Amino acid sequence: MSAMGAAAAGQPARRAKAQARTKAAAVPATAYISWVALALMTTSSVASLRPAPTMAVYGLAAIFLYLVPAIVFLLPTALVSAELASGWNGGVYNWVAEGISKPMGFLAVWCQFAMTIFYYPSLLAYVASTLAYVFNPALASSGTWTALVIMVCYWTGVWVSSQGTKSVAGLSSAGLIIGTLIPGALLVTLGAVFLGQGNSSAAPMDASHLLPAWAGISSLVLIVNNFLSYSGMEMNAVHVGSLKNPSREFPRAMFLAMGLVLAIFILPALAIAWFIPSDQLSLTAGVMQAFDTVFAEFSMQWMTPIIGIMLVAASLGGMLTWLAGPSKGLLLISRQEGYLPPFLQRLNKHGVQQNILVTQGVVTSVIALAYAFIPDVSSAYWIFSVITTQVYLITYLLVFVAARRLRRQQPDHPRGYKAPLLGTLCVVGFVASFAALIIGFVPSSQFGGGSTALYVAIIATGALGLGLLVPYLFYRSRKPSWRLADAEQVSPS
């Protein structure tokens, strides 16, 4: 064979090797993250100063009221979601659809979306009361001001999201530092100095007040709001596959995150209790009340507007980052299965589900008006916070049932992480979630002397109507024509 012939004969082999090298180079290496990084990511998405005034009314007992739901809800949710995320892609819809049924999967993803309808008014009510301290603290108790801020901020967020911008994506992580860690650390530090100077705490800080005073079941109702404070762990569980050793590192990450989250929740709540008597505490403006009081004590009131802007910026950044997320997940499933009418599935020129956001905005605006007509802004804030929690708890009930069924029915399905004692975790998480769901219908001892029947009617209409009746009507009304052929072009965020 000539040299030319030998070269020609070797060309296929060389091409095959080159193609193999190209394919190997095209396969990206797994981008591992440390378990500490995952713990910080989880802390960033869960922890906030917003719930602090709610628990500050309990003083030292806030430790107990935060620790209990962390054990019976936060930990089971984190570990169970990690197993599901490591075995089934697609989030809560696929988990519940595989473990129970597709209709229940739709209910789970619907409730994950629907909770935001009440979540954003309560979040923006906090923004309104915080922003009031930048201009005029008296506005914090004004329902008209609160309603106006809610509508302006929400519709501005819809416009920004509808443009398909990604410029706000980094605000959520920056918000942990700007709007949570720095203000929280400052509040606790100055509070400790205040006590160290010999001043007495507004709330008793002795061992006899470690447990909340028992005044019937209503005295424990505020613990329900802590379930919402800990919600969102299922979103972080998707990163379990990015750990080198999930079985060892994920539990470490979750325990570290739980410790950080508890510190962020408990210490500022205690600091607020040191300064503000419980009967004078606003559930929406309590954080700024505390800052205003402590800054006045140290002749630093010029800092109050600055802290207010930091808290507002962090809250708005989080709202913009998450505004379209749940609705995009609902959009994907609806296009695949035909659960929503075509009008709600329509996209704008930027590929954003604008019609869902606008429809959600109309409902949010109606809810915002309630702040203008309910005399006590704190009562309105509490009602909407409870409704938000009730709707979201339906999702968790379904997830715990699905996880246990999947472990029994598909024991050999590949899982990157297996939660220890999964059956026990599911039972504890389910019972805790169900108990919180029931307790949410009992007016809080801090709520006031309003009509119990009216309170129950409002909570039932909001939680059960939006969480169960509306998705049932959508499911019963579905048509084959509601399935859109380009469903695969949409991916959940």
Image (tube, grey):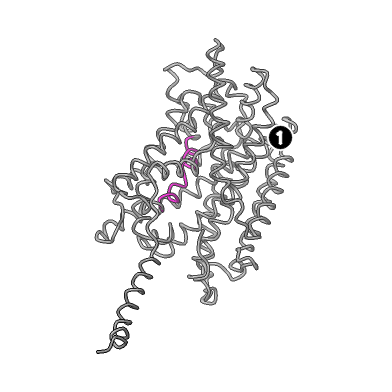
The magenta stretch is: 223-238
Q: Who's the residue at 40% across and 41% down the image?
A: 36
Q: Which is more toward the observer, 345 or 251?
A: 251
The answer to which image quadrant residue 431 occupies is: top left
Type of residue at label 1?
Ala
Asked whether 38 or 283 is in front, the reply is 38
On whether residue 233 falls in the magenta region, the answer is yes
The image shows residue 240, relative to residue 338, as above or below, that is above
Residue hosting label 1: 132
Q: Is residue 311 magenta?
A: no
Task: Please tell me in which quadrant of the rendered image residue 416 appears.
Answer: bottom left
Image coordinates for residue 321, horizontal then vertical, percent: 58, 51
Give the x, y percent position of residue 242.
38, 52
Using the image as rendered, state which of residue 113 and residue 196 is in the foreground.
196
**Viewer can see residue 438:** no
Secondary structure mostly seen in magenta is helix
Q: Position of residue 314 (x, y in %)?
A: 60, 41
In the rendered view, tell whether residue 134 sits above or below residue 204: below
Picture coordinates of residue 43 (x, y %)? 46, 40
Q: Residue placed farthest to the top in the image?
A: 198
Total tally of numbered discs in the picture: 1
Q: On the rendered image, what quadrant is the N terminus found in?
A: bottom left
Res. 131 in view: yes
Left or right, residue 104 beside residue 489: left
Secondary structure, mark 1, is helix
Disc 1 crowd rating (10 Å Cα; few below 14, some 14-19, many 20+) is many
Q: Is residue 475 left or right of residue 448?
A: left
